[in-house]
Image: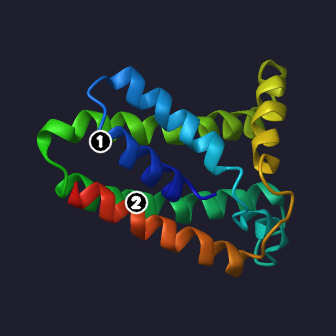
Amino acid sequence: MYLTIHAAIGGAIGQFIDQPALAFALGFISHLLSDGIPHGDEDIIKWKLFKSNTAKMAAAGAIDFICLSLIALYWIAGTPLAQMNGLLYGIAGAIAPDALWGFHELTKTPLLNWYREWHTKFHYLFVKKHLTVLQGFMVQIPLLAIMTWMITKF
């Protein structure tokens, strides 16, 4: 699942939590559970525009980061100050699992091998089927819309 969607779910949960550590933890857990929903970003490695898998992942990550940055500005603008800490800590917690995974992928540090294997298992938590990128967008865009509505309306 793209970071934008994970952040939306973590932010939607976190905005209701007064304690930053709890908002972060629930964001982290929400990431792992939502990874169990088939989401279609596995086909990024089939992109023909880039030669290496690292370049493909970097391009997808950059696009996702830009989308996340823009929509996060919208969430922040629509969030009451009293809920801001929970929103931001929930977002941070929801992004953290992929940040750790990405750090492992870039550095290949053996210290995080256990984490990579553990995190990957969550992708097959509920369903073992992969979706196409288009099918993934059909899952993720409605989720993003619902979470954005929750963040800006509650």
Q: Amino acid at mark 2?
A: Met
- How packed mark 1 is, by other alpha carbons closer than 10 Å (few <14, some 14-19, many 20 or more), is many
Spatial CA span between label 1 and label 2: 11 Å
Q: Foreground: 100 or 134?
A: 134
Do callouts 1 and 2 mark residues in contact (Cβ within 8 Å)?
no
Question: Is residue 21 shown left or right of residue 76?
Answer: right
Report which residue position mark 2 lands on.
Answer: 147
Give the x, y percent position of residue 134: 69, 81
* Quarter location, residue 119: top right
Q: Quick check: 45 above or below 85?
A: below
Q: Foreground: 130 or 65?
A: 130
- Helix, strand or loop at mark 2: helix
Which residue is depicted at the point 55% across and 60% down? 62
Q: Quadrant of the N terminus?
A: bottom right
Report which residue position mark 1 lands on.
Answer: 15
* Quarter location, residue 52: bottom right
Give the x, y percent position of residue 16: 29, 39
Question: Is residue 20 shown left or right of residue 8?
Answer: left
Q: Amino acid at mark 1?
A: Gln
